[in-house]
Structure formats: structure tokens, C-alpha cells
């Protein structure tokens, strides 16, 4: 995978998070939206918003983190994302451990990807045909980011939440054929096998503190 392409696509995760806060539309708007229409709207607005906002382009970390706290949860099933990354150990974890893991994982993702926002320049989003039926509760929305160079694959896994009015939520992201959750699942499993759930949480917390000193 080309390092620059990976860095750019990784940055889209933070860009997407930042967009959710900048959009004026309430989360309930997504309930009436088809999953591919939701991704098209958000993806396009992400790129347009970054291009117009120098602060986002600079990867202003405190601002991104604050914005995540106010809007990320209504639009992304972050609990499912964290549980999938943790694997079987998630079901054995206490509620306190689950909350701490979600908190540290969110900070890790934002800190890891926020610095790549400056990579956005002239890219545009192209949607691929959606393979779905009305009965689907989970599906994949496939897109391409087109600009200079070869198109970059960027796909989303979504789940239809049971709560009335909640609509579709994103719980995984595929960058050039590599699913985000799969990447972290392997890393988490090694740490859990060696040090347990508390050890994983401690490792993430230490990494986040180290990254914070670099800001």
C-alpha cells in the first residue's frame, strides 16, 4: 500500500468525525436516508469542509477530539466497532473495562489520523452500485476517492440500528482492501493474550499519553 495513499485515507476517518460535528443536520436525519445516500452526502461534505477549513487541514487535535465527543456517537456504532476489535474478550470484560477501552480506542484513532487531514486537496467521491435488499440489516457501501493518481478504494460497513429513528450507523472502514477493525483486532488479541484486558487498556492509555506529548 502506498504510504501517502494510506495516510490520506486514514485521515478521512478523522475528517469524517469532524464533519459530523460541523454539519447542522440532526442525527435523526439519517433515519430516512438510504445507506449509500448517507455515505455520499457525508463523504462529499467531508471533502468540501476540509478544503474550506484551514483548521481542519492542520489537524487541530483538541478541536477534533472535542467535536468527536459531541457528535460521533449518534452516527457511528462505536461500541460495536470496539467490541469487534476486542474480539471474544469483549464479552468477558466488565462494563467499566468496556467503557475505558472505548474511550482509549477513540482517542487512539483520532490521534493517529488527525495529522493526515492536510493530505486532502482535489479529491472527489465516486459511489459504486449498492448491492442490497430492503431486508438487509447490515451491508457494505463501496466508494472510490478520485483525484490525482489512481482511484483509492474506501468502503464502509453499516448496520441498521433497531431503535426507532436511529437509521444506519457506520461501524467499520475499508482502506484499499484492509478493514480498520481487522487491523486492530490482531493487535488487540496479542496484547490481551499477553496481559489481559486491563493490560490492553493500559497500553492504549500509555500510547495516547505519548502521542499527546508530540502535539
Image (cartoon, rainbow, N blue to C red):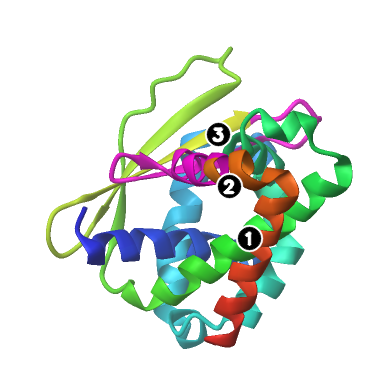
* The one of 162 and 134 positioned closer to us in this rendering: 162
Magenta span: 160-189
Residue 69: x %, y % from top left: 74, 65
Q: Residue at x 59, y 69 (%)?
A: 207
Tag 3 secondary structure: strand
Residue 189: x %, y % from top left: 56, 39
Q: Residue at x 21, y 52 (%)?
A: 1
Tag 1 secondary structure: helix
Q: Toward which corner of the image does residue 183 lie, by quadrant? A: top left
Residue marked by disc 1 = 203
Q: Toward which corner of the image does residue 24 lie, by quadrant? A: bottom right
Dot placed on the residue nearer the N-terminal end, 3 or 2: 3
* The one of 107 and 42 positioned closer to us in this rendering: 107
Mark number displayed over residue 191: 2
Dot placed on the residue nearer the N-terminal end, 1 or 3: 3
* The one of 19 and 196 positioned closer to us in this rendering: 196
Residue marked by disc 3 = 158
* In contact (CB < 8 Å): disc 3 and disc 2: no
Dot placed on the residue nearer the N-terminal end, 2 or 1: 2
Is residue 27 in view from this perspective? Answer: no
Which image quarter is the C terminus in? bottom right
Residue 145: x %, y % from top left: 28, 53
Amino acid at each position: 500500500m502506498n504510504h501517502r495513499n494510506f495516510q490520506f485515507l486514514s485521515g478521512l476517518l478523522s475528517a469524517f468525525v469532524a464533519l459530523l460535528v460541523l454539519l447542522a443536520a440532526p442525527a435523526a436525519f439519517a433515519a430516512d436516508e438510504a445507506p449509500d445516500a448517507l455515505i455520499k452526502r457525508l463523504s462529499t461534505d467531508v471533502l468540501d469542509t476540509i478544503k474550506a477549513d484551514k483548521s481542519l487541514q492542520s489537524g487541530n487535535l483538541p478541536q477534533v477530539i472535542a467535536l468527536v465527543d459531541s457528535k460521533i456517537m449518534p452516527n457511528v456504532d462505536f461500541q460495536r466497532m470496539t467490541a469487534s476489535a476486542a474480539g471474544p474478550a469483549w464479552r468477558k470484560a466488565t462494563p467499566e473495562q468496556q467503557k475505558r477501552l472505548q474511550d482509549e480506542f477513540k482517542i487512539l484513532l483520532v490521534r493517529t489520523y488527525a495529522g493526515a487531514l492536510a493530505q486532502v486537496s482535489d479529491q472527489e467521491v465516486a459511489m459504486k452500485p449498492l448491492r442490497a435488499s430492503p431486508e438487509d440489516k447490515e451491508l457494505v457501501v463501496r466508494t472510490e476517492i478520485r483525484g490525482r493518481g489512481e482511484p483509492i478504494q474506501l468502503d464502509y460497513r453499516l448496520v441498521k440500528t433497531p431503535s426507532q429513528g436511529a437509521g444506519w450507523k457506520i461501524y467499520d472502514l475499508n482502506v484499499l482492501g484492509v478493514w480498520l477493525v481487522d487491523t486492530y483486532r490482531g493487535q488487540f488479541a496479542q496484547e490481551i493474550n499477553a496481559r489481559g484486558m486491563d493490560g490492553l487498556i493500559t497500553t492504549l492509555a500509555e500510547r495516547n499519553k505519548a502521542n499527546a506529548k508530540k502535539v
